[in-house]
Amino acid sequence: MNYIGTLRNEVQEMARGAVALLPNLAIALTVVLITWFVAKFALRIADLIIGRTKLRPSLRNLVDTMVKLAIWLFGLMIALTILMPGLTPASLVAGLGIGAVAIGFAFQDIFENFLAGVLIMVREKMRIGDVIECEGIKGKVEYITLRETHVRKLSGELTIVPNSILFKNPVEIFTDDVKRRHEIVAGVSYDTDLDEAAAVIRKAVEGVDQVDTQMGVDVFAMEFNSSSVDFNVRWWAGSTPRNMHESRDAVVRAIKRALDDAGIEIPFPYVTHTFKEALPIESPVTD
């Protein structure tokens, strides 16, 4: 058997097939190039239309991604049918369906995060800029993609969170509203008139600029501590972490000053222990 002759014939046949395929290849590449231009132009049109609406940034990203994905799928399908004439759109769609099932099993986590990203972008809550906490991760949402969400922690580190975690677990949104309630514990000595102390504390808190007095200030006698009677002091102020620190700092200073002026004693063990627990120190933030 002439192996060399057979190999030569096969190579020649492949070369003739490649040459015959060159026109289709050129047309397919042209279609891909046109698809690129159309996708780019369509994104500009979509951004122009969306810019006139009040859609959230995350939802705008979703619309842009879907427009680009649809155009590229259609363009690549046309290019493949041109490159392989025996491939019809019906057979290509059927092949994509079977392939999608196989790929879905192989990349289940990726598709789970993708679908979770779509649902996160569609729902109203958890917008870009919100401060959230989920599964021990607390920070500001900087960016939402179809697969992951970028959360900047209060201490400055960036955490990339898979969307499935944010979708399947409870998410606490601290900045869902511009105001939220803050609280501290303040203690006075046992020989203090509690009604007088409560009035002094309330007046001090109401005099703080950061406090929203229209939403009310609460001063509740809470418990008998080892060396003090403790009050739970609650007020409403800005919802960002910086708002919390600023209003808490101003409230603590105002209460201390008011109690000193009224001659009401804050027991020493309370100051050295309870205040440290009530006011945890976090890294400074700029929000």
Image: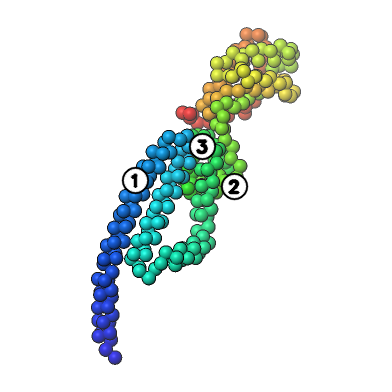
Instruction: Kindly identify which numbered label has been placed on residue 5.
Output: none
Report the front residue among 193 and 95.
95
- The residue that appears at 28% across and 74% down in the rendered structure is 17
Q: Read off the residue under disc 2.
A: 168
Spot occupied by residue 211 in the image (x, y as percentages of width and height): 58, 19
Characterize the local packing of mark 1: few (<14), some (14-19) or many (20 or more) Cα atoms within 10 angstroms.
Answer: few
The amino acid type of the residue labelled 3 equals Arg
Res 210 visible? yes
Q: Give the amino acid type for the residue marked by disc 2 in the picture.
A: Lys
The residue where tag 1 is placed is 41
Mark 1 or mark 2, earlier in chain: 1
Number of labels in the image equals 3
Q: Nearer the viewer, residue 100 or 230?
A: 100
For this view, does 263 lie left or right of residue 138?
right
Q: Position of residue 91 (x, y in %)?
A: 44, 67
Q: Which residue is found at the position 37% from the left and 42% from the top? A: 45
**Which of the marked residues, 3 or 1, is nearer the chain's N terminus?**
1
Rate crowding at label 2 as few (under 14), some (14 to 19) or many (20 or more) other CA atoms within 10 Å.
few
Secondary structure of the residue carrying tag 3 is: loop
Callout 1 secondary element = helix
Using the image, tell me which numbered label, if any, was put on residue 127.
3
Q: Would you place residue 192 above or below residue 6 in this image?
A: above
Please identify, in this view, whether the residue under mark 2 or under mark 3 is nearer the observer.
3
